[in-house]
Image (cartoon, rainbow, N blue to C red):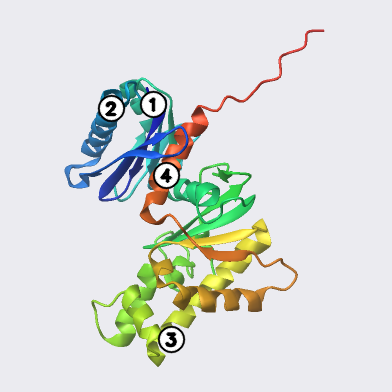
Amino acid sequence: MVRHVIALDVGGTGMKAALVGADGTLLHRARRSTGRADGPDAVVAGILDFATELRAHGVGQYGEPAAAAGIAVPGTVDEADGTAVYSANLGWRDVPLRALLAERLGMPVALGHDVRTGGLAEGRIGAGRGTDRFLFLALGTGIAGAIGIGGRVEAGAHGFAGEIGHIVVRPGGAACPCGQRGCLERYASAAAVGAAWAAASGDPDADAADCSRAVASGDPNAVRVWQEAVDALADGLLTAVTLLDPRTLIIGGGLAEAGEVLFRPLREAVRRRITFQKAPALVPAALGDSAGCLGAGLLARDLLTITPTTPEVST
């Protein structure tokens, strides 16, 4: 008999899953297509079927079903209510995913936002391990963040905490799908850097990784494009540091794969902007694309932690 939990990370195109032991050991891994081409109902059905298979695997291999399950999904998530509110990629609206999974699996289920869940893993067992306050940023197609306090991630009153990609860093600048102009993710996401370098280089297929390699080789046009992105990112980070005072800034996502090509100028740009604030440590994420799945496992394990309650005192 091995006590374990189910961890499931749902992406726009694929799902990553694991069975995680009580000590955090990954006992079993699996992947499956999200199947979004068949519509949102099919996506939900696929999630439920995948989770059912994971439960059955646990029974067959370890002699008992999982004790709990955690699932991370993209889009807008109401973690308190257990609802996947909206996802443009998956096409769903107001899916009571926690209740559906709990009914199918017969166990407690935790639902989390994908970036906040990945941030939880980075902060608790990854690059921010041992840090009491951190800010995790994922620099991918867009930019999203996770605010970590005391080993947990803050979702906010309405589930929008950490949306640093929509801090306005260039007032009146490029239009953003969110309705604002000049949002950080229009300048410093991997997608934005890729688009800027494609225009500057004349290669419509160029992406952020190509720009990074050109920067490393000393291409002046690439250096200009890269520095504009770094400056925008530093402006956004300064706002975050001023508001949140994190001890550690953890940077992940596709753009962070550039390594010191990104981190060296970014640390310098943040340092130049700091006045009265305390400069946080600025470090690369450590868990890669496993962060969401590992974070889902942490959410599930947290459900099994019994918090003592104070008994009522009668008068």
Side of 291 where 129 appears, left or right: right
Number of on-image labels = 4
Q: CA distance from mark 3 to mark 4?
A: 35 Å
- Residue 91 visible in this rendered orientation of the protein: no
Whichever of labels 3 and 1 marks the residue nearer the N terminus, that label is 1
Task: Tell me the residue that label 2 is attached to.
Answer: 61
Label 3 vs label 1, nearer the camera:
1
CA separation, marks 2 and 4?
20 Å
Q: Measured from the top left, where is residue 162 in percent x and y?
A: 53, 53
Q: Is residue 313 above or below residue 5?
A: above
Identify residue type, mark 1.
Val
Disc 1 to disc 2, C-alpha distance: 9 Å
Q: Earlier in the sequence, mark 2 or mark 4?
A: 2
Find disc 4 in the rendering and name its residue.
Answer: 294
Quarter containing the C terminus: top right
Q: Secondary structure at mark 1?
A: loop
Q: Residues within 10 Å of mark 1 (few under 14, many from 20)?
A: some
Residue topped by disc 3: 223
Q: Nearer the viewer, residue 231 or 8?
A: 8
Q: Are marks 1 and 2 in contact (CB under 8 Å)?
A: yes
Residue hosting label 1: 2
